[in-house]
Structure formats: C-alpha cells, structure tokens
C-alpha cells in the first residue's frame, strides 16, 4: 500500500492517528534520513507505545506529536503527504481537522485516506467504520481539496487520494 503512494525520499509525511506506529516506521524508512515522519495521535497511551516501537525499530527521523480532536498540530505549509489509515471516519469534527490538515500541506501536498469500503457488504467491518468514495468526496472536496484518484487493489479498503487544491 505504501509503495503505491510513490513517496519520495526526503519527503515530510504525517501519519495521522498513527496509533502504535505500524505505518510510521515503514514511512520513516521510505523517506530516508533526509525526510521526516510526523506521527500524530490524540491518545497518550498510543503515543507511549508508538515511542517504544519507534525506538525498537531503530528509526530516528520520526517526530511524535499529540494532536487534539480538531487539530493534528502539524507545521503550517510543511507537509508533503498526510496519511490516514482507517482514521478519517473516527473524527468527531472532520471539518476542523481537515481544515487544519490543509493548512499543513505544501502547495503540491497530498492527503491519502484509507477507509473500509461501505459499498461492499462482504467487508467484515461494522458499518460505522466504513465509508464510500462518495461519502469521502462529499465531505473533503467542499473544504478545498481536489480529488485525484482511488486505488482499489486492497481487498477491503479504498485508497482515496486528494491534493491540497491551493
């Protein structure tokens, strides 16, 4: 999944809702020593486990950030790519969160949402944890993001890509 995003070495990538860091340390290796991963979560317990896992993986280009339900606390205009894996549908205030994410993106920055397919009743996930492509687009595009494409090779999830639209 990460390889399909064509992330360049030296990029600044934000892993929003990073949890224990499953994608974080993989992203850290992709962006290399000249790049950086900002691993964000709102739960202190997740951040503790994340820090331990990052240390155990031996990567040193990760910045751990505690966000809030409305703001991921990312640097303004400094992020090439924001990744949210099974995270967007959990936002209690998606408009505020996405507005702040948009401010953090570089002019050519991208947002990638990975969400379980609502359109497929065979996906064994509770409906409240699923989103359709149209659901995502109808919420994200009015906030100034431009739909780029959907990657559909994962068995249960969409990979939905937007640009900053600035």
Image: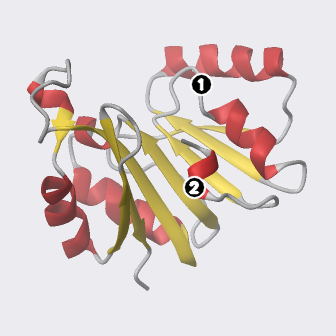
> The N terminus appears in which quarter of the rendering?
top right
Task: Kindly identify the residue that appears in the image at 61 percent across and 64 percent down.
Answer: 79
| In the image: residue 50, left or right of residue 95 | right
Mark seen at residue 22: 1
Crowding near pointer 2: few (<14 within 10 Å), some, many (20+)? some
Task: Kindly identify the residue that appears in the image at 44 percent across and 31 percent down.
Answer: 42
Q: Nearer the viewer, residue 155 or 15?
A: 155
Give the tally of numbered discs: 2
Q: Quadrant of residue 151?
A: bottom left
Image x and y of residue 160, in percent: 35, 56
**Which comes before the other along the chain, label 2 or label 1?**
2
Image x and y of residue 102, in percent: 42, 68
Q: Is residue 81 above or below residue 51?
A: below
Q: Nearer the viewer, residue 97 or 2?
A: 2
Image x and y of residue 11, in percent: 73, 61
Crowding near pointer 1: few (<14 within 10 Å), some, many (20+)? few
Task: Kindly identify the residue that appears in the image at 50 percent across and 66 percent down.
Answer: 110
Q: Which residue is mark 2?
A: 5
Colour logic: secondary structure
Would residue 118 be seen by someone viewing this image from the given angle?
A: yes
Q: Quadrant of residue 137?
A: bottom left
Marks 2 and 1 sit apart, C-alpha to C-alpha, by: 16 Å
Q: Secondary structure at mark 1?
A: loop
Q: Is residue 115 above or below residue 77?
A: above
| In the image: residue 18, left or right of residue 53 | left
> The C terminus appears in which quarter of the rendering?
bottom left
């Amino acid at each position: 999944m990460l390889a399909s995003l064509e992330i360049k070495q030296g990029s600044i990538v934000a892993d929003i809702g990073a949890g224990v860091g499953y994608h974080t340390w993989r992203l850290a290796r992709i962006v290399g020593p000249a790049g950086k991963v900002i691993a964000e979560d709102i739960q202190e317990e997740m951040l503790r486990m994340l820090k331990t896992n990052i240390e155990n993986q031996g990567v040193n280009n990760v910045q751990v950030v505690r966000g809030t339900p409305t703001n991921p606390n990312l640097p303004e205009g400094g992020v090439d790519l924001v990744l949210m894996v099974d995270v967007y549908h959990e936002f209690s205030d998606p408009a505020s969160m996405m507005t702040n994410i948009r401010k953090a993106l570089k002019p050519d920055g991208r947002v990638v949402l990975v969400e379980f397919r609502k359109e497929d009743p065979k996906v064994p996930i509770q409906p409240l944890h699923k989103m359709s492509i149209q659901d995502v687009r109808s919420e994200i595009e009015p906030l100034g993001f431009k739909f780029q494409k959907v990657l559909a090779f994962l068995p249960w999830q969409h990979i939905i890509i937007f640009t900053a639209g600035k």
